[in-house]
């Protein structure tokens, strides 16, 4: 009888231990699920923020530092960004691309260009016009430009960039016209910032037939 009593006591103790372990496992499972749900909520919030924020990646720059090691590389990247945004587009994205470039324009250029591009945007949407600009990078001309009688007290320089290439106009998936073009840009150095990571302001943007 003593043996049976001791065996029953051991079984009862084993049941209690198993019950405690089961409770621990359930608590751990609930905690893990709670952590996973919190992480999922945070990830969803991060994804939403990433979709709504514009990010400009500056070549050769370090984290939180907007001035790259090579100013020529940055200037070349900025020229490509401006020329492609304004000259390579479809009728559905020209308006957004113009807005992305307009924030880098000087007040005077912005005032002059707004009406021109509003008319071009309307025409593009109305007639379904797209444009493709293919630059001839071997012919790009870069020189320092100085306006007579004007001196920047901060020592910021202005560059004149002449970019040659072919501009194709497309309607209904068919090229309707091709022009040899020269793009003339004046780019003034300015203080790099989070708003303007390139550190350049566009003071002139003009198109003309290639010479």
Image (cartoon, grey):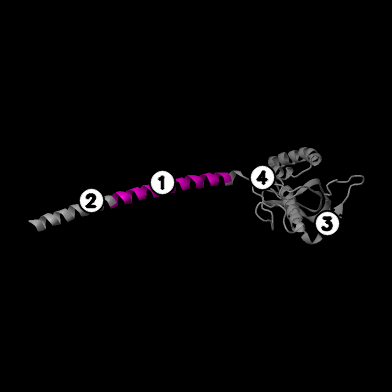
Estimate the spatial distance between the alpha carbons at disc 4 and disc 2, rounded to whole Å: 69 Å
Front residue (pair 170, 50): 50
Q: Label 1's element?
A: helix
| Label of residue 93 in the image | 4
Question: Which mark is first along the chain, 2 or 1?
Answer: 2
Estimate the spatial distance between the alpha carbons at disc 1 and disc 2, rounded to whole Å: 27 Å
* Residue most extreme to the bottom: 138
Horizontally, residue 136 falls left or right of residue 25, namely right
Estimate the spatial distance between the alpha carbons at disc 3 and disc 1, rounded to whole Å: 59 Å
Magenta span of residues: 21-49
Q: Residues within 10 Å of mark 4 (few under 14, many from 20)?
A: some
Front label number (1 vs 2): 2
Front residue (pair 151, 204): 151
Front residue (pair 134, 73): 73
Question: Which mark is first along the chain, 2 or 4?
Answer: 2
Horizontally, residue 176 falls left or right of residue 184, namely left
| Label of residue 16 in the image | 2
Q: Do tag 4 and tag 2 residues touch (Cβ < 8 Å)?
A: no
Q: Quick check: can you spot residue 168?
A: no
| Label of residue 142 in the image | 3
Q: Which residue is mark 1?
A: 34
Front label number (4 vs 2): 2
Quadrant of the image for the C terminus? Answer: bottom right
Quadrant of the image for the N terminus? Answer: bottom left
Q: Label 2's element?
A: helix
Front label number (3 vs 1): 1
């Amino acid at each position: 009888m003593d043996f049976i009593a001791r065996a029953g006591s051991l079984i009862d103790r084993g049941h209690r231990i198993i019950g405690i372990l089961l409770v621990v496992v359930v608590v751990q499972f609930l905690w893990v699920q709670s952590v996973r749900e919190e992480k999922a909520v945070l990830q969803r919030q991060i994804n939403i923020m990433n979709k709504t924020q514009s990010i400009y990646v500056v070549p050769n720059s370090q984290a939180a530092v907007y001035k790259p090691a090579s100013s020529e590389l940055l200037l070349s990247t900025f020229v490509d960004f401006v020329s492609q945004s304004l000259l390579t587009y479809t009728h559905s994205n020209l308006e957004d691309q113009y807005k992305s470039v307009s924030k880098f324009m000087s007040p005077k250029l912005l005032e002059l260009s707004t009406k021109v591009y509003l008319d071009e945007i309307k025409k593009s949407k109305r007639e379904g016009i797209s444009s493709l600009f293919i630059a001839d990078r071997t012919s790009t001309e870069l020189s320092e430009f100085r306006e007579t009688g004007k001196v920047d007290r901060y020592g910021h320089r202005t560059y004149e960039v002449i970019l040659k290439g072919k501009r194709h106009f497309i309607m209904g998936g068919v090229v309707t016209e091709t022009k040899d073009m020269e793009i003339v840009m004046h780019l003034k150095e300015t203080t790099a910032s989070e708003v303007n990571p390139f550190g350049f302001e566009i003071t002139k943007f003009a198109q003309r037939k290639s010479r």
